[in-house]
Amino acid sequence: MGENIFYINTDECKRPKMQDSLLASRIEIAEAHCPRTTAEVTLVVVAYNRVEKTKRCVESILKYTKDIDYNLILIDNGSEDDTLEYYKSVIFEKKKIIKISKNIGGMMPFTYIDFQDIGEYMVFIANDLVMTANWLKNLLICAKSDRSIGMVAPLASNCSNFQSYNLGFASEKEMQEKAAMFNQSEPKKWQERLRLITLAPLFKKEVLFAIGFPVFDPAFFHDFADDDVTFRVRRMGYKAILAGDTWIHHDHCFQIGEDKDIEEFQKSLVTGRHAFREKWNGIDAWDDVNNFYFDVLPYISSPKAKTPKILGIDIRSGTPALDIKNHLKNYEIWNAEISAFTQQERYMEDLHTISSGIVACDREEFIKDYFSEGFFHYVVIGKPINQYHEPQKVMRDAFSMTERGGLIILTLLNSFGIREFLNILGKRESYNPQISLNIPLEVLYKELQKTGEVKFCHPRRAGVSQEEMNILKTLLSGCTAGEAEMQICLSRLVVSEFVIGIEKK
């Protein structure tokens, strides 16, 4: 019997040299282990049936990917239509086709990609995407701007996670014309994010090397695989960026799961969400990450400091502080520094991924022990102030750590909103399980004005059904002086919480 020997030719590979940082070392190792033999960028298109969408996708890639050296890996994931025949007909020199005989999962195709076929960058493209002018050029500009950027995703139509943008078009021609005008590189529009929906995400090769190949964890059959890969990228020391200057078309209805049974689609979401919590020690991909402050950002004006310091207190995985940092780019502030304090240890690792300052975990009474007085220009308290054991002390500490003229942002749960009102009336299913102190808005205002000036009070509405609204109107019509007074009462009852900004005197 002959020897079973598999020879690996490394004659053309260079020996890696010691580097001065973790990220630089990864670049060196990736280049040494997998020297570039194909192209600068590898575009991977995965299709399962829907050959007409696949044609539209591939043709848009060929038409709108200009002046960039790239190769195509076209994967047919068990299609039963003419997908393979179409792939064969595609005229492109640097093309490789992978045919999978049977679809055994959405993530499995990535396990069949040879690492040696990958360029310096890799982009995964589903067959329901339509590419536009400058799409890849812009993603590369962003990725190359900072060694610590590990992945970049564009805006798209029909996308969740605040990654959608409505261009408003009536035809393919109009869509491409508007996209060409929109897709102009603008670093102010780049947003660092905790999680990204991966519609045409671009990864650096060394990042794929660091997080492990295949890129997507096969344990996530479909939903939450993109949340998972973003977490892995960040926890390896890289940034995940949403390129707000780049738009592509997603020809898909994400809300109902096109081509899926609705019941199965909902089950997939529940299962994927549970798997994510299980893998990431209790972190919830929605509740712990989607606490965006986009509705509050318009109230935040230009800072006086050139290098503003941001402190996030109990902001879960860190989104509120990141939102402020991203927003400050509009004022040419590129180097804001984030520090964080949390009472829950499970958030520490993710807070470290976005912070360049101190990150601490302790009980609420010890917040002030970790930070200097008058040090911060922005302090954002994510947990509602009336859910703290000692809300007055937390507010005093926040003011103490803020410089004069700095902004403190806090939240007050409406302790007598529609849920409490309906519960008193006997609708027990409307009970609000969030335990909070009953602090009226007017009382809080009075307390805050002792040391600061209230700059804004932004109400966030509760989810109120039409049935509940009708009940309220019927009840209030008999105990209010008129329509105007009833509307005032309604506007207060339907608020779930108030976000308040105070400038320190």
Image (cartoon, helix red, strand yellow):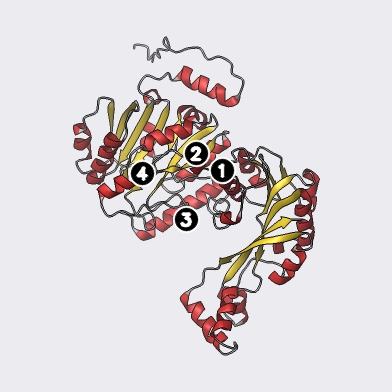
Residue 414, image quadrant: bottom right
Q: Is residue 327 left or right of residue 402?
A: left
- Residue shown at 37%/15% (left/top)? 4
Q: Is residue 83 visible?
A: yes
Q: Which residue is mark 1?
A: 329
In this view, the residue farthest toward the top is 11
Residue 270, which numbered label? 3
**Height in image: 169 above or below 457?**
above
Q: Are marks 1 and 2 in contact (CB under 8 Å)?
A: yes
Question: Looking at the image, how many numbered discs can be counted on the residues?
Answer: 4
- Tell me how far mark 4 sits from mark 3, CA to CA: 39 Å
- Tell me how far mark 2 sits from mark 4, CA to CA: 16 Å
Q: Position of residue 34 (x, y in %)?
A: 43, 20
Q: Position of residue 141 (x, y in %)?
A: 45, 32
Q: Which residue is mark 2?
A: 187
- Residue shown at 59%/25% (left/top)? 22
Q: Residues within 10 Å of mark 2 (few under 14, many from 20)?
A: some
Mark closest to the chain's N terminus, 1 or 2: 2
The label nearer to you, 4 versus 3, is 4
Task: Inspect the image, locate mark 2, and give the three-letter code of the amino acid beneath it.
Answer: Pro
Mark closest to the chain's N terminus, 4 or 3: 4
Task: Inspect the image, locate mark 4, and give the three-letter code of the amino acid beneath it.
Answer: Met
Q: Which residue is mark 4?
A: 181
